[in-house]
Image (tube, rainbow, N blue to C red):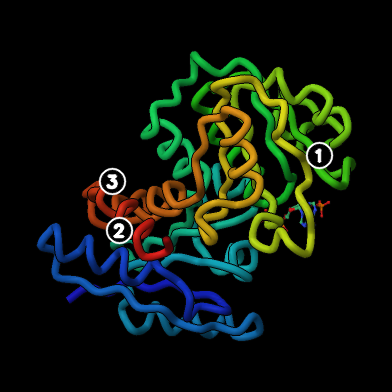
Amino acid sequence: KKWYAVIGNPIAQSMSPTMHDAWFRENGIDATYIPIHVDAERLGEAVASLKRLGCSGWNVTVPHKSAIIPYLDEVDEVARRMNAVNTVKVLEDGSLFGTNTDGQGFVRSLQEIGAAPNEVEELLVIGAGGAAAGISYALEAARFGRISITNRTLEKAEQMAEAFPGSHALSLKEAQMAIDKFDLIVQTTSVGMNFAQSGMPLDPTGISEGAVIADIIYNPLETEFLRRAQEAGGKTMNGVGMFVHQGALAFELWTGVYPDTKKMIQSITTELG
Ligand code: ATR
């Protein structure tokens, strides 16, 4: 029997084990998926143990996404540019291959709600961290419009813009003033999770009617940012789709099967609702 895992700290809250186990069942694959708590200082030992114990592949979450790279034999371009790995596959010769499915997962979830690249001319990414880089990379590859990047720390937005030819950085104030010109806005900061304490980086009031507004947060299902965007006439998308599709892409890499994402999005939405 094959087995897969997710390593992180904290890990108890992860919904990945339930999701992947359901997909293994649905597809008649004799495998299981377990969560493993790994402290930062024991990452090397953990990787060695996973190999020794015959794990076929694993997901990597906070705080190990960058730290795991030196322990892998091969890392693809996506993961290298993001400096972050979320999926590892153990190849036939026992070597470890790392990639990152977060950005592409986001693009798949956008496509699933019917957003098409040719409908997006101007797009705004809020945030300049790891999640923003992965999503920008995937949006660029899928040719979703011209990318503007805005961030609390403008310098980081500028650094990110340099890595994406054709993109440019805006201050939060500039982005706020031009909010009505964007066809797609992606909120990638962690602010949505504790809105009460931190406040929104940008107010979506004033967006253009019918613009697509996405937040990568999925718990809560509706952040204050999305609630206001909806009120303002936006077509909103929360982070459940991205979470499910990043998992589906990992599942496909491991098994060759792209699992049923629609049903999974529904069941996770019900569970969190
Ligand atoms: P992730 O991998 O989830 O993207 P990260 O790399 O730590 O995490 O990036 C966090 C992002 O959220 C950054 O863009 C950060 O802005 P700064 O570069 O200014 O730190 C943004 N962020 C976090 N807390 C924020 C807050 N309270 N207000 C605005 N932006 C915030």
Front position in the image: 35 or 189:
189
Residue 182, picture quadrant: top right
**Tag 3 residue:** 262
Q: Is residue 258 left or right of residue 173?
A: left
**Mark 2 or mark 3, which has the lower sequence index?**
3
Q: Give the alpha-carbon distance from disc 2 to disc 3, as whole Å.
A: 9 Å
Q: Which disc number belongs to residue 267?
A: 2
Amino acid on which disc 3 is placed: Lys
Q: Is residue 251 left or right of residue 206?
A: left
Look at the picture and state if 178 lies above or below 198. Answer: above
Which callout, 1 or 3, points to the residue nearer the camera?
3
Name the residue at 36% across, 34% down.
112
In the picture, the disc for residue 157 is: 1
Q: Quadrant of ligand 1?
A: bottom right
Residue at 78% across, 46% down:
201
Mark nearest the camera among 2 and 3 is: 2
Mark 1 and ligand 1: say if the CB distance to the nearest ligand atom is below 8 Å. yes
Q: Earlier along the polypeptide chain: callout 1 or callout 3?
A: 1
